[in-house]
Image: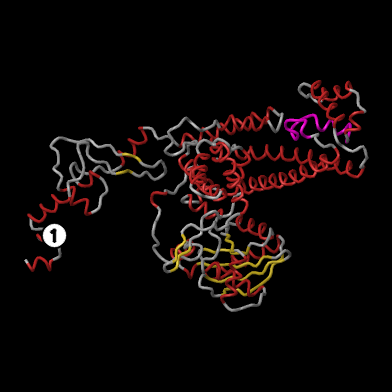
Amino acid sequence: MKNTHSTQNKVRYRTHIQKPKGSRFTEEAKQIGPEKVGTVPIDVHKDKHCVTICDYYGKILKDEFEIPNTLTGFQVLLSCILEIIDKFKLEKVYTVMEYTGNYHKNLANRLREAKIPVTFVFPNSAYHLRQGQLNWSKTDSIDLCAIGQAFVNGWVSSSPPLDNFYENWQTLTRARRNEINLQTQAKNRITNLLDELMPGFQELFGNFWEHNAPPVILQLAHSPKQLTCLNRSSLLQKLTQAKVQKPGDLADKILIWAKTSIGTSQDFPSKIQQLNVEWQRFLTLKENIASYHISIAQYLAQNPALLFLSIPWINVPSASEYASEVGHFDNFISPKQITAFLGIAPKKFKTGKVSFENGHITKKGKNQGRSAVITIANNLVQGNDYYAPLYLSLIARGKAKQQAKVAIANKFIRNSFRMVENSQLFEPPAWTGPTLKNDPISKLKDFLHNNTNDKTLIEQIVAQAQQTLDTILKQNNCPQEKENEVIKQTPQPVEGSVEHIGLISEKENEVIKQIPQPSKTIYRRLKRESIGSNVVFSRIKPSNYKGPTPIGNVLENMVTSGKFPSWILTGKGPQYAQLD
């Protein structure tokens, strides 16, 4: 997936005073004509919706009316919109509604299916617009006016809604994250109960939560006293059936622990029951997480975010969480927009002589997306050979750990944006060490084997991922053929002219004119600086060009030719020339 925008051509300075959320709708209304643009503010509720229709200037074309939150209500709304379009000869109509839980989603989907643009306004924006009118009341009519004013004044959300693919993917990643949190809570409760009923039991296993033996043992006994009543042969048989490695050594280790444990001989049936319930909850959550992992991997195998698996210490869940929260990378012109969208951009405060350039992060974006990218930063600083040294250098310069991790998160956003934009695997800029990138397909395959035993399903997902990866990397074909084709299409300037040297300013033009042109032909090859849909070529100097002519010599030649007065060589103004 190529980004259709170029970071090389972005506007660095304001061209006009923009509205709070940009000037996108203003430009569209200007092209069509504001009198031919209609707006449909909708105040969304659970059982009904309040609607009015007006033009872009705010003139009401149809008074406020209510529709039920049913298919019949939607059909009534659609007929009213079509009637107003025909009556006032409108060329485009925008519907704008307030984010209200999940009540707006079905209506918004129906409107999109009818090819009617849908925009959203945050409740906080409508609240501030009511405050601006010094109106402290809140009614449906006042809310409708505030929602309509939010659209006209540019307070609507500038982020396009997620399509069905990203919305489903995002739902899965968030559900998985919720299950992870519940599993962590269950683990903490199980640990507390085991520390009281069977102290030291967890330390018998290398990885307690992934080991096959604990479920078997907890079915047989819930205290060291009960374990001592078991004979070695029965315990060994159970461990062998659970396919435990070296079951004999583990059985001896468990029996020795049971005889030397400080656990009390009293029975606690209530706590044993709680331990059984929590353990079953843990196993159920573990199965749910594994199923979510498979579904998430299926979506990742079809998305350009598959490239992120080439970064060491990033796996399928973290890459999926980040990509599903960000959505289409084509919606962003630069990585700075993603940092602002996620709310990890630093605040800036400047008034008079007081200036703070890098304050705390804004935390005004998507909480889930910000959490996902910070999780990635936590993983990268642990062992990634590119990001970990950067993190340690920031700590050495006096940065707090959390500040350094936010900086690593911003660094990852910039690199990931370039990876998707340029359709390439992980290649750190200015990196001279050994190759860091992992094989995304191998990493995906290992992840799938850890979550399912269905070989057919694994082969299908891996095949889809390989096809996606091949398609992405083919877009990054920057061979000499494509470069020559672009150069052939570029108008070739006349040999020896200023344009032949490159794009230069007027001052550089005057300097270059003083350079003696060589008699022989110089072949110059254009150098490509970016790999994107918009190719930018850098200025190339002649092969025998040894540097600019000293400015003093140029000025002397210009004074001799009469282009400049003589006093310019002394550095003094014309008043000194008059005294002479």
State the image quarter where residue 46 is shown.
Answer: bottom right
Question: Residue 210: within the magenta?
Answer: yes
Q: Nearer the viewer, residue 551 or 537?
A: 551
Q: Is residue 382 left or right of residue 485?
A: right
Which residues are drawn in magenta? 202-222
Q: Residues within 10 Å of mark 1 (few under 14, many from 20)?
A: some
The figure's colour scheme reads secondary structure
Q: Is residue 566 left or right of residue 446?
A: left
Q: Is the residue 558 above or below the residue 425 in the image? A: below
Location of residue 52 in the rendering, given as x and y in whole percent from the top left corner: 61, 71
Q: Is the residue 239 above or below the residue 391 in the image? A: above
- Which residue is the extreme one toward the bottom? 134
Q: Which residue is mark 1?
A: 568
Q: Is the residue 115 above or below the residue 317 in the image? A: below
Location of residue 280 in the rendering, given as x and y in whole percent from the top left corner: 83, 39
| Quarter of the rendering occupied by the C terminus | bottom left
Location of residue 568 in the rendering, given as x and y in whole percent from the top left corner: 13, 60
Does dot 1 land on a helix, a strand or a loop?
helix
Q: Nearer the viewer, residue 429 or 42?
A: 429
Q: Residue at (9%, 65%) from the top-left corner? A: 577
**What amino acid is found at the position of numbered circle 1 in the picture?**
Ile
- Counting labels gives 1
Question: Residue 492: within the magenta?
Answer: no
